Image (cartoon, rainbow, N blue to C red):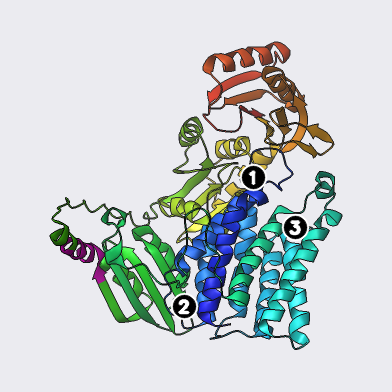
Amino acid sequence: MNASMLRDAVISGANNILNQKQSVDMLNVFPVPDGDTGTNMSMTIGAAARELQMLQNPESVARVADVTASALLRGARGNSGVILSLLFRGIAKGLKGLTEAGPKDLALALGMGVEAAYKAVMKPTEGTILTVAKVAAMEAATASGAGKDLLETFEAALAGAKTALANTPELLPVLKKAGVVDAGGQGLVVILEGMLSVLKDGKLIQSAAGQETAASGGPVNAAGAAEEDIQFTYCNEYLVKRDKSIDKDPLLLRAYLETIGDCVVVVDDDDIIKVHVHSNEPNKVLAEGLTYGQLINIKIENMRDQHERARHDAEQHMGEEKPPEEIPAAPAAPAPQENDFGFVAVAAGEGLHALFADLGVDHMVNGGQTMNPSTDDILAAIEQTPAKTVFVLPNNKNIIMAAEQAVHLATRRVIVLQTRTIPMGISAMLHFDPDLDPDQNAVEMSKAADAVGSGQITYAARDSEYDGYKIKQGEILALANGKVSFVEQELTKAVVRLTKELFRKDSSFVTLIYGEDVSEEEAAQVEAAIAAKIPEAEITTVPGGQPVYYYIISVE
């Protein structure tokens, strides 16, 4: 397998999961509207596909794997996306230094990918994408050890993945009860099938959504792009001859370049760092590169000038004239580390954004259950927070892993608190003490988050039999601390019942956060109903504006 084959295989896999993401989404057994697995995996590997298209005539499978792993790391969304990125990060380590890959190289790389994913997951669960990947790697090792060629080895890996996928219901009872296989495992099989299409038939699967990727994998000619699409004027490329006395991670160079441009590619080995970025500030692009070593093969092209000249020729021919566009301002550089502490939180809804801002959060990342932000989204907010230590509050269990991937990419210290709900995030912020050091604060804020009772009132997105409940689409679902508590038909009754369930003998305060589909009058009526049933509670009602959840309930 040469570099171009691997590049096209990954792009083909990305297109295949994009085409089938809805069918993968439908395998999710949890009935709540959420950041569905197929969508998250598609968006994650789609980030790699976009960057791989810029690699014209790549020189090695190692380079392709590095670009893929780097893009997946930053584009990872949801737990399934993060695990996918970890698999490819391990694969990149297995292919390091290789120009081409044979069957044993492939098997080794797959094995290292599985090892990386298992190590990163605190409590690996069998019957998931991890199991599917593990069996695929085992079958690849068996095939390569038996003298099979690369194609036969990859086919063996895919066959093993499919066998493991079919067996996931036997390992996870919740899947068996729902009559489905694991969604993450299915997503991985779909990606591997897309890759096999290139390796076996030389056919790169195209996107059915009208977002076809170029089979050549080459960069788009800047002069041929529409000027309104040119957000950054200069295309910068150079090589850095690494100074062995400078111990700096090239991922930090990439993180910085992302703040002043786009289409960033930073790939490296022990001696060289290759850089490509579109930016309005080539001086800063070069200056940052110099902090890693000497620059060679420097090339800077003005894409607007290229486009203008191409357009001028076309206008002469067509007799038309079009006004030039304004050059947009470049994004800000990373914020200076002026303060000791800073905060980034994830939430959806203007009311929740305002609430967290009032509590001292510096930057909000828009997202939540139905829209999991990427590692890059979270990293960008961290880098714009003017502090030496930044606390990140994911406020959703499916965002924690993506947030944790930003820790090693940031230019400042990052502490990710394990907040799985909005109330946990609010409680953590209320218990921050500026007189404590970062580690002490992390402990105290985490304790406070774990002590709060979190309730959520939403609706069933699909028919389901889950955790002992037969649930019909559209029914009201009450979640207590992330688990289905009961099913109801009437909204007010559901809110009152769930609040009573969460309220303990030592509880005093209830915060009722109502969503975008609830009016102020309706929320007031619900507050009155709770007060009648729990007269000892001190109730605060807040407009959150959040989607999906009619009400979020905090009990302390």
Q: Mark 1 = which residue?
A: 446
Q: Along the horizontal axis of the image, is 544 left or right of 184?
A: left
Q: Mark 2 = which residue?
A: 268
Q: Residue 458, image x and y in percent?
A: 66, 30
Give the quadrant of the C terminus: top right
Q: Nearer the viewer, residue 373 or 438?
A: 373
Do the CB atoms of the residues marked 2 and 1 lie less than 8 Å apart? no
Q: Is residue 404 visible?
A: no
Label 2 and label 1: CA atoms lie apart by: 38 Å
Label 3 and label 1: CA atoms lie apart by: 28 Å
The circle on residue 34 is none
Outermost residue on the bottom side: it is: 147
Q: Residue at x 51, y 53 (%)?
A: 209
Local crowd size for mark 2, using a 10 Å CA cut-off: few (<14), some (14–19), many (≥20)? some
Q: Along the horizontal axis of the image, is 231 left or right of 208?
A: left
The mark nearer the N terminus, 2 or 1, is 2
Count of numbered tags:
3
Give the quadrant of the N terminus: bottom right
- Residue type of the residue flagged with mark 1: Ser
Find numbered disc 3 in the image and state the secondary structure of the residue it sits on: loop
- Residue type of the residue flagged with mark 3: Thr
Find numbered disc 1 in the image and state the secondary structure of the residue it sits on: helix
Q: Residue 129, image x and y in percent?
A: 72, 60
Of the residues tagged 3 and 1, which is closer to the observer? 3
Outermost residue on the front side: it is: 318
Q: Mark 3 = which residue?
A: 128
From what the image shows, is residue 504 above or below residue 160? above
Q: Which residues fall within the magenta stretch?
A: 301-313
